[in-house]
Amino acid sequence: MNDTGARVLEAVKAEDAKQILRALHDRGGEVARAVEEEVDHIYGGVDDAEEIAGGVLARLESIDVEDLWDRSGKRAGGTYVEPAEESYVMLPEAIVPYVARMGDHLEEGDLEEADAMLRGVALGLYRFSRQSSTTFRDWARDDPSIVLEEALRRWRERRGGSAARRDTEEWLRERLPERDWVASES
């Protein structure tokens, strides 16, 4: 994506996104199929954390390091944005649909679905951090665990001290074994 495309996407407000997607879908053909696939991928069934993790990992690995370099560096007014600092902005942007969907499930009381989304997001972030060989990952070394902590904080606020919360946290500890990945919260 070039700099102009990135600026255009940054300018889209959440309330306008649905209208834009509908207009793209109404074009039919390949564009409609691409919109349907992306919506289904993000909002489809959430019963499989592995499938969600695969989607998260694919989105993160698709971040072009050239976009990172375009968004970092010297700015007007003499300020400078480090690539590692900008990576911390770009990484959460890539997985916003997943974290937003988890939040929707929490708000709607679909707690099992929210748990599955959290598991998938956590597993995708973990795999990106540990297995990805992209150049972007080299700039985003600590970002996945920081992003996971924010998702966990939001999820924990809604899950309270439930047995299901403890089960999900145990699932995370088993699959993301490094202590820095799943901090226990009493």
Image (spheres, grey):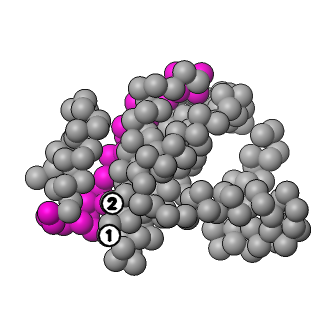
Tell me, yes or no, whether the highlighted magenta stretch contains residue 145: yes
Residue drawn at 78 percent across, 60 percent down:
33
Residue 123 x %, y %: 39, 42
Identify the secondary structure beneath mark 2. helix
| Residue farthest bottom in this picture | 108
Q: Amino acid at mark 1?
A: Leu
Mark 2 = which residue?
Answer: 115
The outermost residue toward the left is 186
Q: In terms of secondary structure, where does tag 1 sit?
A: helix
| Three-letter code, disc 2 | Asp
Residue drawn at 43 percent across, 39 percent down:
125
Q: Is residue 50 above or below residue 96?
A: above
**Which of the numbered marks, if any, corresponds to residue 11?**
none
Residue numbers of the magenta segment = 135-163
Give the residue pinned by disc 1: 111
**Residue 172 in picture, x, y percent from top left:** 27, 44
**Could you tell whether 94 is left or right of 107 in the image?**
right
Decide which of 131, 23 is in the foreground and name it: 131
Left or right for 159, reference 106: left
Q: Is residue 185 above or below residue 103?
A: above
Asked if the residues shown at circle 1 and circle 2 are in contact, with their CB atoms under 8 angstroms apart, the answer is: yes
Image quarter (top left, top right, bottom left or bottom right) of the N terminus? top right
Q: Nearer the viewer, residue 89 or 28?
A: 28
The answer to whether 29 is drawn above or below residue 129 in the figure is below
